[in-house]
Amino acid sequence: MLAILCKTDDEDDTIKTIVGKISVLPPKEAKDYCLKLLYLSSLKKLYNRVKNEVDNMPITFDIRESEIFLDGMREGLIDGIEMVLEIKYGSNGLELMDMVRNIEAFEKLNQLKVAIKRSDTVEELRTILVDMIG
């Protein structure tokens, strides 16, 4: 699988060879390796070519279930929350960001997003955050 990062004369052949070897693995293992291959391929700007080859495999998976994708979504949501806190509450809102970054669960971050919309003060939001963090 690391061959995707190596210099090669024929990237398409390398991609097909790797995907071919992955395709004979048990479905759960193949899914795991496909997600890793997609991640690695993005380092060499080969993501779309690898994704097209993976899409032709006889297994199905939702990339939105991968840890890599979820981590990226979490970071994006935290960035969005930070921007909204600054817009709505200024520097006082940004004081809450250390607490926000301690929230691991994506669902709780979504709940916080709704709470920010409904809250009227930073103190009200701080109370909600303390309850969320536990």
Image (cartoon, rainbow, N blue to C red):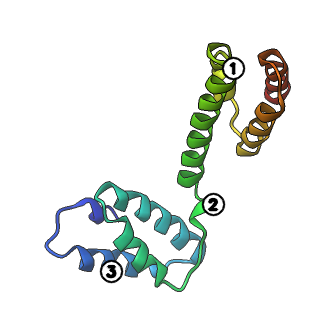
Q: Which mark is residue 16?
A: 3
Q: Secondary structure at mark 1?
A: helix
The reply to whether callout 2 and callout 1 are in contact (CB within 8 Å) is no
Q: Give the Cα distance between marks 3 and 2.
A: 24 Å
1 or 3: mark nearer the eye: 1
Q: Amino acid at mark 3?
A: Lys
Q: Amino acid at mark 1?
A: Tyr
Task: Tell me which residue sits at (58%, 77%) in the image.
Answer: 27
Q: Most extreme residue toward the left, as rendered?
A: 9
58 and 69: which one is in front? 69
2 or 1: mark nearer the eye: 1
Work out which quarter of the rendered image holds the N terminus and state it.
bottom left
- On the image, the x and y values in percent for residue 107 come to 76, 45
Q: Is residue 134 visible?
A: no
120 and 49: which one is in front? 120
- On the image, the x and y values in percent for residue 114 come to 79, 39
- On the image, the x and y values in percent for residue 73 come to 59, 48
Work out which quarter of the rendered image holds the C terminus and state it.
top right
Crowd class of label 2 (few under 14; some 14 to 19; many from 20; radius 10 Å):
few
Task: Tell me which residue sits at (60%, 51%) in the image.
Answer: 70
* Of pointers 1 and 3, the one earlier in the residue sequence: 3
Image position of 102 (left or right of 118): left
Q: Secondary structure at mark 3?
A: helix
Crowd class of label 1 (few under 14; some 14 to 19; many from 20; radius 10 Å):
some
The residue beneath circle 2 is 65
The residue beneath circle 1 is 89
